[in-house]
Amino acid sequence: MTRTGMKGMGRRGVGLLLLSGVALCALHGIATAQQAPTVDGPLQEILVTAQKRSENLQDVPVAITALTAETLEKMDVRDVQDLPSLTPGLQIKTSDASANPKIFIRGVGLNDFNANAAGAVGIYMDGVFVASPLAQLGQFFDLERVEVLKGPQGTLYGRNTTGGAINITARQPTFETTSDGSLEYGRYNAVKAEAGAGGAIVPDKLAMRIAGVYERDDGDTFNRVTNSTVNAVNRWGGRASLLFTPNEDLSVTVQLHGGQNRGDSRYTQARALIPQDPSVAGANGLCAAGQYASGLCTDALGYADTDNNPYAGDYNLKGKDKVDTWGASVNVRWDLGKATLYSITGFDSAERDDVEDTDASPNSLIQSAYKATQHDISQELRVEAPLTDKLRGVAGAYFLHDYLNTSSQYDILRDLRPLFVTDDNPTGFSLENNVATVGYPYTQTGNSYAVFGQVDYQLTDRVTLTGGLRYSQDDKDFRYRSTVEDVVEVFSYANSKSFDSVSGRASIQVRPADDVMVYASYNRGYKSGGFFGGYTRDPADLKPYADETLDAYEVGAKTELWDKHLRLNAASFYYDYSNLQVFQIVTRDGIPTQTFNNAANARLYGVDADITLAPMKGLEISLGGEYLNSEYLNYVSEGESLSGNRLPSAPRWTLTGLVSYDQPLDGIGGKDMGTLNASLNVSYRSLVYFDSHNLARLSQGGYWLTDARLGWTAPNGTISLGLWVRNLFDRTYIMDINNLDSFGLDALSMGSPRRFGGYLNWHF
């Protein structure tokens, strides 16, 4: 595309942004002119902490999908990876069993799976930034609320949130005695038990809550080599919290948490790419689409999976993904009268030892071992105060210390070692033929600092102006070694570098009516530069990469209509994305090589909307959707221009729908017999590419998923039981693809097949 064409597309994107804002205001005028329905059961208020204070969702000028504990329970949301089915514009994928989620919001994210990869979406657990990708999946249980903040959060959150943030809030200790929990059993001998309980230790002074989760199943994939199943799950997590309130002005919450995973590593499907007959070769010399399971295409050692069963394979290695996490946090809120002081202290530690059958075959073509230890200590201090009758301010400082030590390696072409055995080389090692065990141990130490401030000015009763700035600095020290056979050092690399940036926010918020809020905002997000943490034989690959920045322009509206029976929130956005950090796997010297560099820039724009309707008592309907257009504007990788390509994990369309209905049951004489509960969730993702080259082979076409739940709740609401099904129509789909074409295969991570089972929940 020409530069003129790019500018034209940019103008059209801005025009779309402004036009959408006008349309949103017009929509309000049409809706409010209609008569409100005379039915019971208006929508409940949802409180969020997106701006680091408790507010009504409808008062926050940020695009947010907020999921309450009730919604999470109804739709059996088990971990972070289940959120996309309820959140338009959110994509989460992983090639690992219990670590390194790759999170994208509105097409902004990072594909890198290495231990020092810093994603573009921040995950916060009870206000603590979870810096380690090893620890981001372990505390998703006993929850009060999940908030998905869309777009860069450059002031109050700041660090590495060019895509957005996910706020996870656990149930907190209360002075009222409570108990909550669930038991589930389902297909693949799946068991899940989750429980939490708490109450006062010293009335009005000291309260506690203890919660935990245990989950296991036998796995959904059959291993023909061992005649057993793989992709098994086996993990647990726990949390203990104490709330101390010595007086009404001071509260201190201390939390300890931990968890462990002992399930299988991720077993993929091997798709053979090397034609053994010219008739099955495609234009690029690899196996033609539709011929992968023909038996006429194999991997580099002659293996082909020919049964077209996405949940069966031939695996010669018993892979385990062992992850241990533990941590603590202290949250302090101190009301000083004219101001409120907040202190949030966090510590997280994680260790991982993962061995995987990367080639997904009965041969030893390539096997991977990932080992890492990571420790993070963070401290945030924040003060909030009304500066005048019309001016409210917040200011703070943030510090994070991160230590990472890794020792990972790849065992390549072990089955070929007998060909190279000699008296002088009894192991058969041959680096020139890529027959070797190669490693890349390194340590990275980082210190991050930030100061920030934001003010809200009440210009009139209906107009509020907001401005905020954040200065960030990241100091990183990197020590890397490239090794062969564990003991031979190919090269070593050491470097230190500081990165700094200014990010922030400016917005105007207008209330043309009590039930309508419209806003326009500008946000700049920043993600620190750093050092690449993947395997390489070339020290040049390890030179520091630059910061990425994202300038976001957004117009949105939040409305509650028809006497609060209809909630309509919508936003249009335009992103100018610069120096974006891109991870790819390319072929060098006959082996797949990981690369990490900065693409010059990209442009994204789109519209998203959430509609919630309560037309009658007991019935709630939620619909959500997003249209996204994404494009690299100037990107050359390994000498190949990728300009004009779509960004990976950025589908044009994402749609979600949830219908929930509660029907009271009356017995003889009008006796209350409880309530019948039914819910149905559908979601859609259009075509998505898994890498920046936009190859059809490395993509997944559009697909729908459907989940359903049917149950009964006792008259007093304390007990409920029922049946559930996930992926009701047993849709086969690909979650991610690891491109290993230099070894003659693609490794496909498959989505879960249909699962079903029963549940028992309680709330006392």
Image (tube, rainbow, N blue to C red):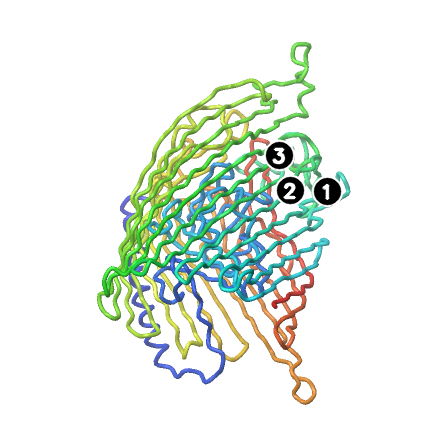
> Residue 545: horizontal and vertical position, in percent?
38, 33
Q: Is residue 674 left or right of residue 599?
A: right
Of marks 2 and 3, the one in the foreground:
2
- Discs 2, 3 touching: Cβ within 8 Å: no
Camera-nearest residue between 163 and 19? 163
Of marks 3 and 1, the one in the foreground:
1
Q: Residue at x 29, y 51 (%)?
A: 453
As measured in the structure, the alpha-carbon distance from the residue carrying label 2 to the one carrying label 3 is 24 Å
As measured in the structure, the alpha-carbon distance from the residue carrying label 1 to the one carrying label 2 is 10 Å
The amino acid at mark 3 is: Pro
Quadrant of residue 634 within the rendered picture: top left
Q: Which residue is mark 3?
A: 275
The amino acid at mark 2 is: Tyr
Regarding mark 2 in the picture, which secondary structure is present there? Answer: loop
Camera-nearest residue between 602 and 178? 178
- Discs 3, 1 touching: Cβ within 8 Å: no
Closer to the chain start, of discs 1 and 2, is: 1
- Discs 1, 2 touching: Cβ within 8 Å: yes
The amino acid at mark 1 is: Asn
In which quadrant is the N terminus drawn? Answer: top left
